[in-house]
Image (cartoon, grey):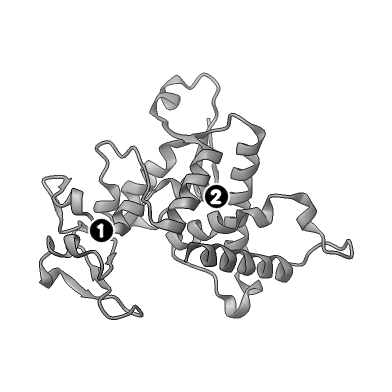
Amino acid sequence: MSQRHNGFELRSRGNGTANQAQRLPAGDFSSWLRQTRTALRDDSGADVACGECTGCCSSSYFIQIGPEETKTLARIRKDLLVPAPGQATGHLLMGYDEHGLCPMLVSGKCSIYQQRPQTCRNYDCRVFTAAGIDAGGDDKATINRRVRLWAFSYPTQRDRKEHDAVRAAARFLQEHASSFPEGRVPHNPTELAILAIKVYDVFLRKRRSVNAAGSALSNADIAKAIVDQSKEFDARAQ
């Protein structure tokens, strides 16, 4: 038995042994959430059990590379790099081939793994599972299959409450873009999922659903709280 929810196919646990066997352990949610938020602040990278999956290497991603990544840049041909739009001088983008493959993917493996870009080190497709959204359209089909296999565990009520809060944040961002100044909400799925992880605390406590006067918060109030929380998170990352 299955049903659709937030773009995901949810299978009933029941006696579906075969379906359960296909699930991939994503870790305890609260532990993963803290590790992910730390990595977003200090670029310490994600620890993902990728196995043989190369979905992020074959899904038409542009990879940003900073000027300080000299060891990485030394391994990449100059003709594969272009200036990153809107970024300071020296920030570059590496594109993909006509099949959506990273040019560093050789014989199904990363040919510069030890010197791979920080963008690749930070990538964790579990952010989409956490937010309850897909990674994108048809060009992200491989990642989306992986996203639907990840299964977080919930050893405590805190794990469940925090996961519910992340998904609530993602839903609000998707459904109430007009509540933000000039509708400034990420449309890129990766940016949206990461923002939901940064601001989940806005949706965590019921007491935050009312203002000081005891009235229910408006969508504009919630949007402002999200903006403030995002700015605070980014300031602590600097």
**Residue 22 at x, y percent in the picture:** 39, 28
**Amino acid under label 2?**
Asn
- What residue is pinned by disc 2? 6
Is 75 situated above or below 46? below
- What residue is pinned by disc 1? 117
**Residue 126 at x, y percent in the picture:** 43, 45
Q: CA distance from mark 1 to mark 2?
A: 31 Å
Question: Which of pointers 1 and 2 lies earlier in the amino acid sequence?
Answer: 2
Instruction: Label 2, secondary structure: give it.
Output: loop
Residue toward you, 105 or 45: 45
Place residue 93 in its image quadrant.
Answer: bottom left
**Amino acid under label 1?**
Pro
Residue toward you, 36 or 101: 36
Badge 1 local density, few (<14 within 10 Å), some, or many (20+)?
many
> Foreground mark, 1 or 2?
1
**Residue 65 at x, y percent in the picture:** 26, 66
